[in-house]
Image (cartoon, grey):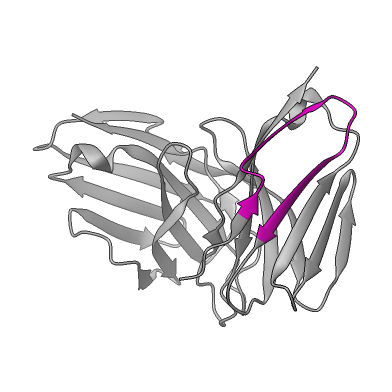
Amino acid sequence: SQQGEEDPQALSIQEGENATMNCSYKTSINNLQWYRQNSGRGLVHLILIRSNEREKHSGRLRVTLDTSKKSSSLLITASRAADTASYFCATDGGGGGADGLTFGKGTHLIIQP
Amino acid sequence: DTEVTQTPKHLVMGMTNKKSLKCEQHMGHRAMYWYKQKAKKPPELMFVYSYEKLSINESVPSRFSPECPNSSLLNLHLHALQPEDSALYLCASSPKRQNTGELFFGEGSRLTVL
């Protein structure tokens, strides 16, 4: 199965700065999603971008998708302490049906107050 | 109701015990999932149920036995587990669509096998 790869694995920035995380994947997709996970908790869906979209915005989040490079980026602007969490990209494998998502290794983001 | 509820939140069991993890959703979703997550690792897909039928089993050992009694409930029966099975077990659901859209996750059941 495909496996997304995020970089960096860990990122520490000051509150108010922007945070950028990247994700690469290996096979075709229908969509790519980003999730946040606070320590030891469940995952929360942030944003979904379809394979025919190149950029999407939601509040302070901006996601880009380059299917030719099989890569995506997540930008969080004006970061806050509450954004401290792990962020995962996830892909659906390109098939039909509710086959679940394959998650990347994740980026652990720390926002210093 | 947009919640996926998992019980118990924490479970400690011995290698000879039999226990179950439970998951419930009332969003009318017809696809439900079990994921396993080890510390500092991404969630790994274990099982997918679609319309109460097991559609995907990602080569999970038989000591994990899933069950979907109805469209709202998903169980994971545990028997003769090993210490390396200690992990956070996450349940998720999604509307049955052509492709996998947003997954709604529960808070997880943290399992410790002694």
At which x and y percent is residue A29? 64, 76
Q: Residue at x 28, y 66 (%)?
A: B59
What is the residue that sits farthest to the top in this orientation? A113
Predominant SS along the magenta part: strand
Q: Nearer the viewer, residue A75 or A44?
A: A75
Q: Nearer the viewer, residue A32 or B99?
A: A32
* Residue B75 is covered by the magenta coloring: no
Q: Residue at x 79, y 67 (%)?
A: A65
At which x and y percent is residue A47? 76, 55
* Residue A9 is covered by the magenta coloring: yes
Residue A37 is left or right of residue B109, and the answer is right
Residue B84 is left or right of residue A64, and the answer is left
Vertical arrangement, residue A61 with respect to residue A112, above or below: below
Q: Nearer the viewer, residue A63 or B104?
A: A63
Res A102 seen here: yes
Residue B87 is left or right of residue A104, and the answer is left
Q: Quick one: quadrant of the C terminus of chain A? A: top right
Q: Quadrant of residue A18?
A: top right
Q: Nearer the viewer, residue A26 or B9?
A: A26
Q: Residue at x 82, y 57 (%)?
A: A63
Which region of the structure is painted magenta?
A6-23
